[in-house]
Amino acid sequence: MTAEVRPRLNWEAVDLGFAMARRWWPRLALAWTLTALPALVAAALLLPDHPWWALALVWWGKPLYERGPLHVLSRALFGHLPPAGELARALPGLLWRQALGALTVFRPDPARSFNRPVAQLEGGSARDRGARLRTLQRTAHGAATALTLACLAFELILWAGLLALAWLLAPGGVLGLESGSLLDELSATARGWIMVLAAWGAMAAVAPFYVAGGFALYLNRRSRLEGWDLELAFRRLAARVAHLRRPAAVVLAAALVLPLSPVPAQADELHLLPPAEARQIIGEVLADPVFGGTETVPGWYPRKRAGGAEKEPGGEVDLDWLARLLRALAGAGDILGRVAELLMWLGAAVVAGLLVIWILRHLPRGGWGLKSRREGGADAAPRTLAGLDVRPESLPEDPAAAARALWQAGRAREALSLLYRAALAALVARHGLRLPASATEGDCLRAVRAMAGRLGADTADFFAALTRLWQAAAYAHREPAPADMETTCGDWPHHFGGGP
């Protein structure tokens, strides 16, 4: 074996599994990818416009993807790491065997990583597997469930980290001023697929450790029940003395032959000590600290007479009731553990539901930007946005005509500033745009995209084009092309005209 199999604590066994996963991670990841990647591609082809449903299908099939890594671990433990070709040939048989039960009845099993080796490596009928699992799970079911929750937490953390990395590394807008602007330009479906790919990558990274941890728990439980460590120790001892068989045979033969040689009779010289003298010598030997002596060990022990005599009246306390109580508490502990596990899963479901409700209430459906709300209650219309005055009294009656006049006078930057301010003022007054005064152009753009269902897609696209022209003129000192400026001044009244 390539690992030392001996009785361990449950979490020591999980640590051994993680060590095996680190050692053979490339082959384990390959075994998982050979089944999970085709599933992701198939889900993408079947549901191209519904990335979240595709992710749900891929996630539901995880019990099938974990069979390849388990196959690799079961061979690598005995010194044979299956090559890619052998693994590809073995996968079809692994996937179809008991696939229906794995995806239906046993899919919600929280101890799947521990239970799967029994079905895949031991086989047998369903009744035999059930009895076998009841025996194996007595001290390992809780650890296997905790391993599932821990790996799920690692997947979520890694998923969030990959999304944050994509957000931070995405190029900015036209001028690179607003981080994440390129992602804002993508459709909701494209952003959904980015999140699906990040989730798939997180599952691929954690799956080898999850499978190996459950496999090590299974090995540890079997070594405790079946004494694998003793068997392996005897085999190592047999191998160590195998080369001594011939000398040992010679010595044994000599030991058998030598006693047959004639020896002078010494019966007459045998001298027996009297019993009193023998007892005295034995007492002297036992009195020596090297060979005898007594040791007093304090403690509470029931007093019993030698030879099973009757108890002294009132001398011994009957502790049988305490033993019965402890056995009853041990049986109730298993029941309480399963009830606690059920309550934990119910609590996790409630927390997940509350989290989904919070997300649906606080995040817009059209994007990842800031939330925009209609005016009402304590919400006050902002006076400035992106450092620009958006009060209606600060604007001319016809912003488009005033902007065209400024542009024709060679003041294109001021013309774009006027159109952009007037557009923000119209959004605040007529469409309930509410953003803090510290909001940037990117925040405003994300909020407008979130309101695209109410404003219309053409208005949201026009505002995005206006924002790019304004950023180019304000920060890069790059004046717009005459055709772009003419189009902007001509189209502005169709989207934001009518006065704030």
Image (cartoon, grey):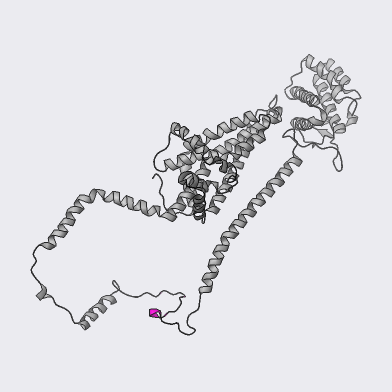
Q: Residue at 8% x, 64% y: name it.
A: 262
Percent x, y of residue 7:
43, 54
Answer left or right for 378 relative to 282.
right
**Count of numbered circles in the view:** 0
Per the rendered image, the range of residues in magenta is: 293-313
Q: Residue at 84% x, 22% y: name it.
A: 492
Answer left or right for 496 relative to 84.
right
* In the rendered image, the vertical position of residue 394 relative to residue 122, given as above or below: above
Using the rendered view, name the quadrant where residue 449 is placed. Answer: top right
Quarter of the rendering occupied by the N terminus: top left
Quarter of the rendering occupied by the C terminus: top right
Percent x, y of residue 170:
64, 29
Answer left or right for 485 relative to 259.
right
Percent x, y of residue 72:
46, 39
* In the rendered image, the vertical position of residue 275 relative to residue 476, given as above or below: below
Percent x, y of residue 195:
64, 34
Residue sitting farthest toward the bottom: 313
Q: Is residue 72 magenta?
A: no
Using the rendered view, name the quadrant where residue 369 is placed. Answer: top right
* In the rendered image, the vertical position of residue 15 relative to residue 431, given as above or below: below
